[in-house]
Amino acid sequence: MNARALLFIFTLVLCHGTRAEAGVMDRLRGLLSFGGGKSKTEEPKKIMPRIRVGTFSGGTGASAQQALRQELLDSREFFVAGADEKADYQVEGTSSGGRVTGKLRDGKGKDLFQRSYAAPGLDENLKALTDDVIYTITGRPGLATSRIVFVSNVSGKRQIYVCDAEGGEVHQVTHDKHAAVSPSLSPDSSMIAFTSYRTGFPIIRLLDLNVGWERGVTDTPGSSFGSAFSPDGTHLAAVMSFIGNPEIFVSDLNTNTAACVSDSVGAPSSPSWHPDGRQIVFSSDDGDGPKLYIVEVPQKEGAASRLFRWRTGYHFCTDPEWSPDGRQIAFTTRTSGEWTVAIKSYPNGGVQVVQAGGAEHPSWSPNGHFITYVQHGELFVHDLRSGNRRSILRGYGHISEPRWMR
Amino acid sequence: MNAAPPMMNRNAAILSSTLLSCLMTSCGSMKMPAFFRNPSSEAVVYALGPRDGFSSPLNGSLKPACPALVFDHADFQLTAAHQQALNGLAQEMLKNKKARLLIAGYTVPNLPPDHARSLSERRALAVRQRLIELGLDAANVQTVGFGNDFSPSGPSSDVVVIYRQN
């Protein structure tokens, strides 16, 4: 199979001053807790960094100290030490009127950071501080402020919504005439790319959640869908069919140029980027069921690249998504006639079935410890370390296509 | 178990916006460059022309040009029955060179949504390709893949519906 690339310039940009739903950028409340009945102060078996929550002075200082301790416990990233216990890190600060200033020090008293948080609510500020503490110590993003974007028909039409990691703070972000589907959040969570049917045809649009405007990315003939932001947020991979075949294209959002990176004779879908931004995994059905393929993204025009099938051992594989560390790929397959979410190590390794019985469309949490998926229209979060899972959103219409902030 | 990935030379053809413009506006009689084509097939793939003036079934009632073409689950190959129906439609359409068609693909509801969109678009493109081979002007035939985002009227949802355009 000869790979091919097409680079061209196309004028796609349409700007519309559509307002986003107010409150979308509100900091989200809540964090996953899969304690399983264990005491949260119980010493974990795995060695975790020990952190102590020191004094927070000011009018809301006592509340801030207590709430921050709970946030850090719920994160399951640390052993939260008591006031008299030894700790590797200490976080302390001030809080007045809901505003928070937090300072993180290591065990030797060296300042690691000091930041102020001035969002409208104390909870929002503490979640932001929690995520900063987690990222500084572990190098992994926290989930306190992360969000999940999904599609629901609860309004009577398929529209796009966001919620926090425990299914709270649900906001509708699109109000398209016919439907809005296939959403993807940018890495900094400031934009959503989605497929809109507002013209009667599927086109890809960008919604900026900070300022509320929308613009078109594609308005090409045929269909456009399956958008996925590159890890640096500058490119968008998506399926477009205007050349007479559905193919995977990579669009540069700054220059509005696009390159065709696939070589399909069938039906490609669901591109997902490796975290290094140099490879894309996608599903393609060449007539015998969808399989997974990997393509290298050419780093310059005319560069040689590889396009190859990545075997999972299953005949029907869709919705692949690379883990945040690039070592695994989650995908939807079919076992015993029902949709199943599975994970396979990349490039080699065994397959782990995460959830059978109708589970589909997996998406990784930013820290790689959890996967969200839908099962019979409900939204689930699955802890890959403990194997525990829970429904975080049910009775909200039929939910599909969840994507966790990357 | 994993396939040894063969190294391939990607002869990336760099096309200017001018060429793109050609593709988008005058593809009716234009053969696609060799690298567009499936090397295992001699079929010429015709790019889609501008969609200006085409109406979507989502925006109003459109009249089907022929009975819906029913596909087997997850298949996009044209069957003998499809070919027969398309032959009849092409004979009728060739009497009016200006007649335009919108080919809309649909799938059953229980497929993964993104795969369903691609499969339905692939089905629509397969029908379009056949109609062009039968003599219809490529510029007058558009496609859209609705996947399972919308359902067509009729008993089966695994279909391609060919809508007449006014």
Image (cartoon, coloured by chain):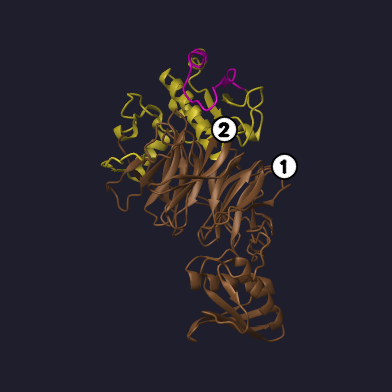
Chain colours: A brown, B yellow
Q: Amino acid at mark 1?
A: Gly
Residue under circle 1? Answer: A156
Classify mark 1: residues with Cα within 10 Å, few (<14), some (14-19) or many (20+). few
Q: Amino acid at mark 2?
A: Ser
Q: Is residue A348 magenta?
A: no
Q: Position of residue A399 (x, y in %)?
A: 66, 45
| Residue beneath the point at 40% across and 31% down | A265
Q: Quadrant of residue A178?
A: top right
Q: Position of residue A17 (x, y in %)?
A: 60, 56
Chain containing mark 2 = A
Chain containing mark 1 = A
Numbered disc total:
2
Classify mark 2: residues with Cα within 10 Å, few (<14), some (14-19) or many (20+). few
> Main SS of the magenta segment?
loop
- Mark 1 element type: loop
Q: Which residues are magenta?
A: B64-85
Q: Position of residue A50 (x, y in %)?
A: 54, 75
Q: Nearer the viewer, mark 2 or mark 1?
A: 2
Residue A275 seen in the figure: yes
Taking the image as shown, residue A398 lies to the left or right of residue A200, namely: right
Q: Position of residue A206 (x, y in %)?
A: 54, 53
Q: Quadrant of the N terminus of chain A?
A: top left
Residue A20 seen in the figure: no
| Residue beneath the point at 27% across and 46% down | A304
- From what the image shows, is residue A231 above or below residue B158? below
Residue under circle 2? Answer: A336
